[in-house]
Image (cartoon, grey):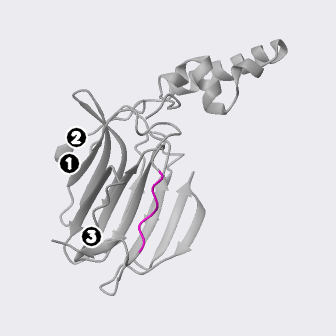
Amino acid sequence: MGDDFISEDDLRTLEGWLKYQGVDPATITPGEQKMWQDYFEEARRLSDANPKVGLMKLQPVPGEQKYAVAIKDESDLWLTMWVRCSSRKGEIFIMYPRRDREWDAHASYHWDGTLHQKSHGTVVHSQKRQPLTAAFRGSEHIGAYKGHGTRTGAVCDPQVFDGVVKVEPRILGPIHGSVAFDLVEPGYEPKPDPLVPQRQVFQRGARPSVIITIRPEDQNLVFLNWPDDFGNAA
């Protein structure tokens, strides 16, 4: 990752925070300096006041699968996203770990094929996809998600997940890098691709497999397309 990567530590400095806002500090007039300083200090105050998530207490549910995306920091693992596949209907829920329940940003792929993107309790985007039945064929892309980091304080315990995608530092950040999710019918998986630095497939028996792809900002990666990008699972 190049020097343009913005980390959460960068956001705690005025220069880094302005860079995140797309503002060149060299262009700020003396009259604007105090305005931006006040904005920065308010953002710091709100960030510091936000309670940390800590160790998420996810209870095991028979027949349910959970998959995590975690950022490595020396010997620590910090949860930045996780997926829950329900046991009854196999519905898919993609979530950020947050203590702020009012925000509650997440995606949900329902049994009838409805794909929702929600935030603050409101559906901000809805699409109709294949139902999650035995008739599911091919693949479905269910989003690429940005806005990552470790300052939520969400500790990843690999023991409570069925699989963990462990990501090296300085790949996923507040605006850099993304995590893409796809589903593919049982018996298939993506073909090997030397341009994809990190991708994992989690098979779920007779239900569609979950594919998680880590997309660094400096990699010109394209989304998976059916059937060209898939082959029979080993």
Amino acid of disc 1: Val
Q: Are marks 2 and 1 in contact (CB under 8 Å)?
A: yes
In the displayed structure, 81 sits above or below 121; it is: above
Q: Which residue is mark 2?
A: 157
Q: CA distance from mark 3 to mark 1?
A: 25 Å
Is 4 displayed left or right of 209 in the figure? right
Amino acid of disc 3: Glu
Q: Please identify the quadrant where the C terminus is shown.
A: bottom left
**Nearer-the-camera pick, 9 or 51:** 9
**Nearer-the-camera pick, 59 or 116:** 116
Q: Which mark is residue 160?
A: 1
* Precedes in sequence: disc 3 or disc 2: 2
* Precedes in sequence: disc 3 or disc 1: 1
Can residue 116 be seen here? yes
Q: Which residue is mark 3?
A: 189
Q: Residue at x 20, y 44 (%)?
A: 158
* Magenta span of residues: 220-225
